[in-house]
Image (spheres, helix red, strand yellow):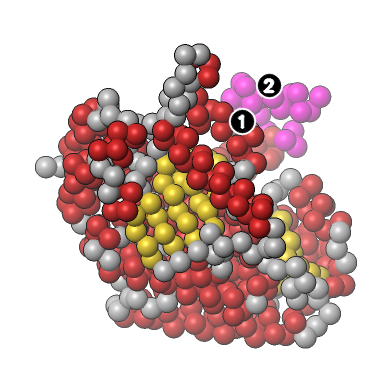
Amino acid sequence: MTMTSLLDGLDAHAQRLASSTLVNLIANDPARAQEFALRCGPLYANFARQRYDRTALDALFDLAKRADLAGAMQQLLGGETVNGTEGRAALHSALRGGVATSAFALAARAQALSAQLRMRELIDALAASDVTDIVSVGIGGSDLGPRLIVDALARPGARFRVHFISNVDGNAARRVLAGLDPAKTAGVVISKTFGTQETLLNGGIVREWLGNDDRLYAVSTNAQRVADFGIPPERTLPMWDWVGGRYSLWSAVGFPIALALGMDRFEQLLEGAAAMDTHALHAPLHGNIAVWHALTAVWNRNGLHAATQAVLPYDDRLKLLPNYLQQLVMESLGKSVRVDGSDIAADTVPVWWGGAGTDTQHSFFQALHQGTQIVPADFIGVVKADHPHAANHAALLANLLAQTEALANGQDSDDPHRRYPGNRPSTLLLLDALTPQSLGMLIALYEHSVYLQSVVWGINAFDQFGVELGKQVASRLLPALRGESQAHDAVTRALLAVIHG
Ligand code: F6P
């Protein structure tokens, strides 16, 4: 049987279950509350409120076997060329542990460790200086991960305050720099390629604003471009083409994280991710959280045909997680062509979106409860609070649990406006506490789930050619904005006329 027909088979299961509700799926099989739940260290996952039964799950695990998800994990962590279109490995796992045994993966691990030593030295030197603030310049994978982790885990009173500039809109640089003293600030320009328009423009602004090149650092694979920009090798940290941009926070791209948290806590983040690597590689399919998460995503997309997926962290410190996951998931899985170049018959990635609870309960949750679209959701909670406001934490957890229950079970009413249809699926991910380890583990779970989804769909999770065309058109438009060319379509010419007044 082909993968396409197996994916089509999910439709048959969804149709078989069309008249079943989550209320009766759970009532008829109460053991699923415990048996559809897994734990890996501080991370607990419960899939009991997904709209599959054990028969549909058997079909999903059959899909996992036929797609050889276990073999795919070995290929990934062994440093095989899983990014075929660019002829590269995707060895982010080598940055954080050492589950791999191939010579290539071991060499990558050695490079990663030597870069970590250099990070520690540079941080120690900066800590011995007058520098109090760090401005990190990067975009996409060279920004979103560090921004998320710093926002989630930096403590008040830390040795350095870390700020981020990503958007090419000059307001981004202006607003960040306005509050800072150039004499007490260091800049880090982060770009895997060192060819990204936004980062080079913003890096140039920071270089000029600092007025002292000694406090400007770089992270890149392209040492020559960094040198041309004016940053010498002793202030440049390496990156490698075996790390994808959106999988790179564990590398020297995480320099701002290490500055904000300290190198020891940065290493704890890596340890948490490494523990998930070990779990994803060695746990049997039925006990493997990454496999369950990936199969659930495939079920919701190809069985239930959900067009979007929400991610709802119930922890204010994780409010940037949806932004981070949008790149990780949608840049990785937003493909309609299989690895062999053929069109994929099934739907691939849905639109990922979300925001932190409880704020979002007062914005878009109305649509989750009563809208016409079914939106599967990942709810993420943290069991132990790190603050003294016990009543707030109890309210937060009560809201988290209440929403998953209300979405699943609904509530009937004679008044159609006050009727809650329920039957809206969710996964609950709970961290014992929010620590570098648990957050590293959570992010690594999403990385592996994304990869496993790509294997089921037969697509390459590690290229992103889709973003290139817009960049090319933008660079052709720059002369047109200066009035030097007309080579665009009629609509763009009309818009240029408006801009030119
Ligand atoms: O958005 C496209 C992209 O290539 C991302 O994949 C990448 O994370 C981002 O641009 C930034 O690229 P770089 O690190 O090379 O500046």
Residue plotted at (80% across, 83% down): 129
Q: Which residue is mark 1?
A: 487
The magenta span reads: 481-501
| Residue found at the far top of this picture | 415
The amino acid pointed to by label 1 is Ala
Question: Is residue 497 shown in magenta?
Answer: yes
Q: In this rendering, would 98 be left or right of 357? A: left
- Above-or-below relation of 78 to 464: below
The answer, for residue 306, to whether it is visible in the render is yes
As drawn, the label of residue 494 is: 2
Q: Position of residue 358 (x, y in %)?
A: 62, 43
Residue plotted at (63% across, 69% down): 257
Q: Quadrant of the N terminus?
A: top left
Residue plotted at (34% across, 59% down): 38
The amino acid pointed to by label 2 is Ala
Q: Quadrant of the C terminus?
A: top right
Comparing 478 with 116, the one in front is 116
- The answer to whether the residues at label 1 and label 2 have Cβ atoms under 8 Å apart is no
Q: Position of residue 14 (x, y in %)?
A: 25, 32
Within 10 Å of disc 2 (Cα), the crowding (few <14, some 14-19, many 20+) is few
Q: Position of residue 428 (x, y in %)?
A: 44, 49
- When asked about the image quadrant of residue 215, the answer is bottom right
The answer, for residue 314, to whether it is visible in the render is no
State the CA–CA distance, disc 1 to disc 2. Answer: 12 Å
Residue plotted at (21% across, 50% down): 61
| Residue found at the far left of this picture | 1
| Ligand 1 lies under 8 Å from the Cβ of mark 1 | no
Within 10 Å of disc 1 (Cα), the crowding (few <14, some 14-19, many 20+) is few
Question: Is residue 353 shown in magenta?
Answer: no
